[in-house]
Structure formats: structure tokens, C-alpha cells
Amino acid sequence: AVKSGTPVGLKAKAVMESGGLVSDEIVVGIVADRIEEADAKTGFILDGFPRTTSQAVSLDAILRDLGIKLDGVINIAVPDEELIKRTTGRQICRSCGETYHVTFKPPKVKNVCDKCGGELYQRDDDKVETVKKRLSVYAAQTKPLIDYYKNSNLYIEIDGKQSMEDVYKDIVASLEKSK
């Protein structure tokens, strides 16, 4: 929306450029605009939205107005300790942007990109303190969504400790059952 210069995107851009947090109203507006685009008519996946119960209530109203029914709401459940391990091990190449992980996808040479030889670094938002703060915000703001969606019978929990392939298979199987 920001890149496209839509009216709601311009609002978001102004807030972001001033260093503020984009309001629920703006985020919901961006999602509403996106859902109405032609390529979303046959279906869509929302990743990371809604993040709060108020956003979920707004999304419900938008979907109701558009005559759209959700097939399911998926929570890929991973214990905090595992999330910290996964996130804090991530490294990114300064030159080409290739992503590595010290445990799951280490470079051949420590701190050197296999692809271009560039320096690998850890983003500030991948440091332990930052990840713990994000998990705290998640617990306060986003976890209540689990109860919200459990009450609507849309909630699907997937074991996120499995391999990526098994998580994918479980998601597909769960959505096929919910249709």
C-alpha cells in the first residue's frame, strides 16, 4: 500500500516516517483494500494479521460485508525457548541479503556468505533482549486472539516444533478438513 501510493498507504507512510506505530485503523484499511483486489477473489492467506482482538473484530466486519467466510485461523505453536533459539541464531549477508542460521543453515566459513563472500551480521531485532520483548508483547496483545478464534471454531493449532515439511503438511490437511 505504501509502495503503491494508495490513500491508506500514504497515511501509513507518514506515520512510519515520523517513527510512530501504524494504527489499527490504518492496518485494517490496508488489509481491507488488499482483500478486495482481483487476485484475492479465489482465496488469500493473512500472515501476521490480525495481531490484536480489536483487529480481529474489524476483520470480521470487513469479511462479513464482503460475504467472505474464513476457512480457518492457524496458530503455529512453538515454545518461547525454541523461538528464541531460532531467531537469535539468524545471520544475514550485508552484501546480498542471503540468510543463514548458526545451527540450522550455517555458512561454510563462519560469518562469511557462501554466495558472495560478504560479511554476515545479526540484525538488532534478532538479539535475545529484543526477541524476549517481542514475546512479551505477543503474550499481552496477540495471545488473546487464541481464545477469540477458539470461540469461533476457526482455530487450528499446528505443532511448530516439527520439520517445515511436516508443518506444511499439517496446515494443508487441517484446511482441507475445515472446508
Image: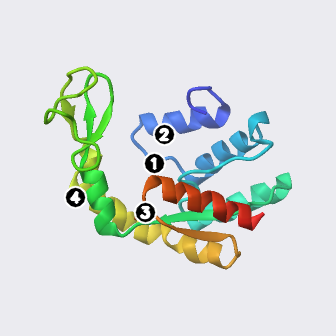
Distance (Cα) linking label 2 and label 4: 26 Å
Distance (Cα) linking label 4 and label 1: 20 Å
Q: Is residue 28 above or below residue 99?
A: below
The disc placed on residue 129 is: 4
Label whose residue precedes the other's in the sequence (3 or 4)? 4
Residue 133 visible to an observer of this rendering: no
Q: Secondary structure at mark 2?
A: helix
Residue on which the image places disc 2: 15
User: At 42% from the left edge and 57% from the top edge, which residue is drawn?
Assistant: 163
Callout 2 crowding tier (Cα within 10 Å): few <14, some 14–19, many ≥20:
some
Q: Are marks 3 and 1 in contact (CB under 8 Å)?
A: no
Q: Are marks 1 and 2 in contact (CB under 8 Å)?
A: yes
User: At 53% from the left edge and 60% from the top edge, which residue is drawn?
Assistant: 51
Residue 78: image location, x then y, percent: 40, 66
Distance (Cα) linking label 1 and label 2: 7 Å
Callout 4 crowding tier (Cα within 10 Å): few <14, some 14–19, many ≥20:
few
Residue 38: image location, x then y, percent: 79, 35
Residue on which the image places disc 3: 162
Q: From the viewer's perspective, tell me whether residue 46 is left or right of residue 43.
A: left
Label whose residue precedes the other's in the sequence (1 or 2)? 2
Residue on which the image places disc 1: 21
Q: Secondary structure at mark 4?
A: helix
